[in-house]
Image: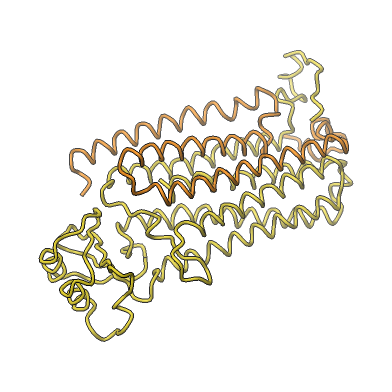
Chain colours: A yellow, B orange
Amino acid sequence: MSEDKTEISSKEAWGGGVSPVKTSYGKQMMWFFLVSDALTFGALLTALGFMKHKFEDVWPLCEDVFYHFPGTHTHLPLMYVALMTFILIVSSVTMVMAVEAGHRLDKNGVIKWLAATVVGGLIFLGSQAWEWDTFIRGNEAQSTAFILPSDNENVAHVRFADDHHIFNESGEINPVELAIEAINSGEATLELANRTTVSNSDAIKFLKNNAEQVQGANMKKNEYGLPLYANFFFCITGFHGFHVFSGVLFNLIILVQVMKGTYDKRGHFEMIEKTGLYWHFIDLVWVFVFTFFYLI
Amino acid sequence: MERDDLIKDNEYALSAHHSEEEGSAVRSKVVKVTIILSLLTFVEVCMGVWLSDRGAFTWQMVKWGFIIMTAIKAGLIVMEFMHLGHEKKALKWLVLAPYIGFILYLAFICLTEATYIFTVGGGN
């Protein structure tokens, strides 16, 4: 924090040996790497924005997709993702604390906070694995989503008035028949991908025209809506998750080095700052993913 | 390029040392930033859950609210956690100016084009 106020002549600064931006080579390069990595994520999120605007009327709402919470059957839209965001923010904070301890040359402080950061990263990775698992299997035991060839292959949902699911009872009866039965008896209605509810006769016409039940998600089809929706989910959260994974790895390596006393010998803990920058960047990207994938 | 961070008396890294008092000032600031970040996330989730079915205009306003809150969160993370706000001005703008300029242009052009495609019915 102690700002170096001494002026250096431009000749000296650009002639070599002196950094014009008063940081070490490694830290500058970490910043430039992060800018380029941020461009990659920026491109992914912009592509997502493009598709969201292009398919504005049929893009699934994340409140209808991510409403599960481990250990409960209550409808808690986006709460789990919010918890994941909070976990990542907290692990960013423990990283700042590690850097701060490094500035005081407090080796034990660095070890304590860096270990906490690694744990936070692992918890986040575990949460993401659970979320992927739920997304791929599907939210309910039996999906009430159908791909309608007569509606541009879009996904329609059978919505029950009293929130129960007929499809739970048997796997032997054709799910399309079950859906038609439910609509005929007035228990349920059919909601098209563009969020309009169609009349019962239209609903049955749509379902009878080769409708296909779809469960969970893969790269080709999913129960939530457009195939692109799942593709973007896998691509963006997967790429981010890979960054978290490598971040945890870097932090672990640095943690071992701190324990071995490498940075005591060097007289400074600047390496913590550099991996810290990478770790905060992961948190920063997640803030954008959270807003632009889940919320908007 | 010589690895200047391996040299024991690297002046840039050494200038980052601070005392016990300065340290506690940093820590209390970090706690403040954390509280703001968590509160903003909480407000965002509440808005997303309860204001999503209040009509197109409200939702449009909520979306702009999300973008503003995200910008504030990003600013806090970059300026405080990543310490960029306290670096030399040259480094700060070396990082921020090209990125912000490029990404704003990219987002603007892509969203404008996508909205046009949706309007002319190319979406489905």
What's the residue at 66%, 57% (across, down)? A120
Q: Position of residue A63 (x, y in %)?
A: 40, 56
What's the residue at 52%, 35% (across, down)? B71
Give the quarter of the figure containing the N terminus of chain A.
top right
Horizontally, residue A175 falls left or right of residue A275, namely left
| Total tally of numbered discs in the picture | 0
What's the residue at 71%, 43% (across, down)? B31
Q: Nearer the viewer, residue B105 or A142?
A: A142
What's the residue at 57%, 29% (across, down)? B96
Q: Position of residue A104 (x, y in %)?
A: 86, 41
Q: Position of residue B33 (x, y in %)?
A: 66, 40
Q: Nearer the viewer, residue B91 or B23?
A: B23
Horizontally, residue B85 falls left or right of residue A48, namely right
Give the quarter of the figure containing the C terminus of chain A.
top left
Q: Tell me where residue A123 sits by quadrant.
A: bottom right
Q: Nearer the viewer, residue B32 or A99?
A: B32
Horizontally, residue A150 falls left or right of residue A115, namely left
Position of A235 relative to B74 (above/below): below
Q: Position of residue A252 (x, y in %)?
A: 72, 57
Horizontally, residue B89 falls left or right of residue B13, namely left
